[in-house]
Amino acid sequence: MGARSRSASGSKDTDRRIGRRALIIGGTAAAAGTAVLARDALGRLWWRVPGVDKPREAGAVDYGGARWVAASDANWRRADRPDDYGVDMVVIHVTQGSFDSAVKVFQDPAHGAASHYVVRKDGHITQMIRELDVAYHAGNRDYNERSVGIEHEGFVDRPQDFTDAMYAASARLTAEICARYGIPVDRKHIIGHVEVPGTDHTDPGPHWDWDRYMELVRRARTAGTAETAGAAESAS
Ligand SMILES: [Zn+2]
């Protein structure tokens, strides 16, 4: 989510119209009209192929430190990551509202967007969409398919909203995500929503302390290396 520099139009994600799988089958990303429809049909067929779904358990979280609250299934798309789409990015957001309001709108099917995680000012983390699935958080189909989205409670113009507890908790989460998918801990792979191509959002804004955050992620990544290496192995 986050502040928009333009109008509220375009809040609906284009994810549900054309899947990346369909584009891969088509062999090109540049197409329109009937070609798109044909690939869309192929994409839907692909999802009927049995065996692509990993077992799912109600209420299960991907991050041990998170509590589960399900987002509306209108705000994400079922997938089988990282087997269908590789995950190589974490996208950092700021909610432009309270934690409770973010969790509430992500449960609203009319909202059209939601992130995998929401981090509260006190460091509490709620997971709302499985990392297996594609969350509509970046406003860019390709980036949604390859990333995990993390929202942070607060406003982009209120630096005091970004608390020590929030930075620390979020950094541990991002470090674990990076460890599990082998994502490099750098600013090419851990980006702000504002850096997503084509976005009209400005979050996390100029007061998000990237130097501090990246240092915390690096530290957490190093501290967790032994533990997460085992988890990554068993997950692959
Ligand atoms: Zn955002």
Image (spheres, rainbow, N blue to C red):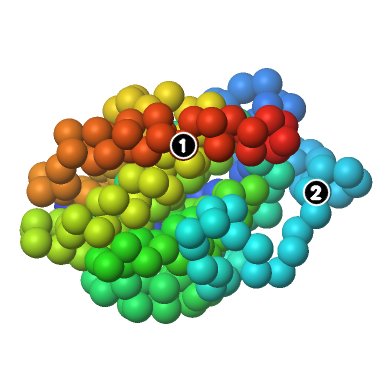
Front position in the image: 75 or 165 = 165
Q: Quadrant of the C terminus?
A: top right
Q: Which residue is mark 1?
A: 224
Kindly identify the residue that appears in the image at 41 percent across and 73 percent down: 103
Kindly identify the residue that appears in the image at 18 percent across and 59 percent down: 163
Kindly identify the residue that appears in the image at 39 percent across and 46 percent down: 172
Kindly identify the residue that appears in the image at 42 percent across and 78 percent down: 104
Front position in the image: 83 or 78 = 83
Front position in the image: 129 or 200 = 129
10 Å neighbourhood of mark 1: few (<14), some, or many (≥20)?
A: some
Mark positioned earlier in the residue sequence (1 or 2): 2
Disc 1 on helix, strand or loop? Answer: loop
Residue 166 screen position, x and y as percent: 27, 58
Up-down relation of residue 139 to residue 66 (above or below): above
**In this rendering, would 188 be left or right of 134?**
left
**In this rendering, would 10 be left or right of 87?**
left
Q: Amino acid at mark 1?
A: Gly
Disc 2 on helix, strand or loop? Answer: loop
Q: Which residue is mark 2?
A: 53
Up-down relation of residue 127 to residue 172 (above or below): below
The answer to whether residue 82 is seen in the rendering is: no
Residue 63 screen position, x and y as percent: 54, 53
The answer to whether residue 144 is seen in the rendering is: yes
Q: In this view, which residue lies farthest toward the top?
A: 27
10 Å neighbourhood of mark 2: few (<14), some, or many (≥20)?
A: some
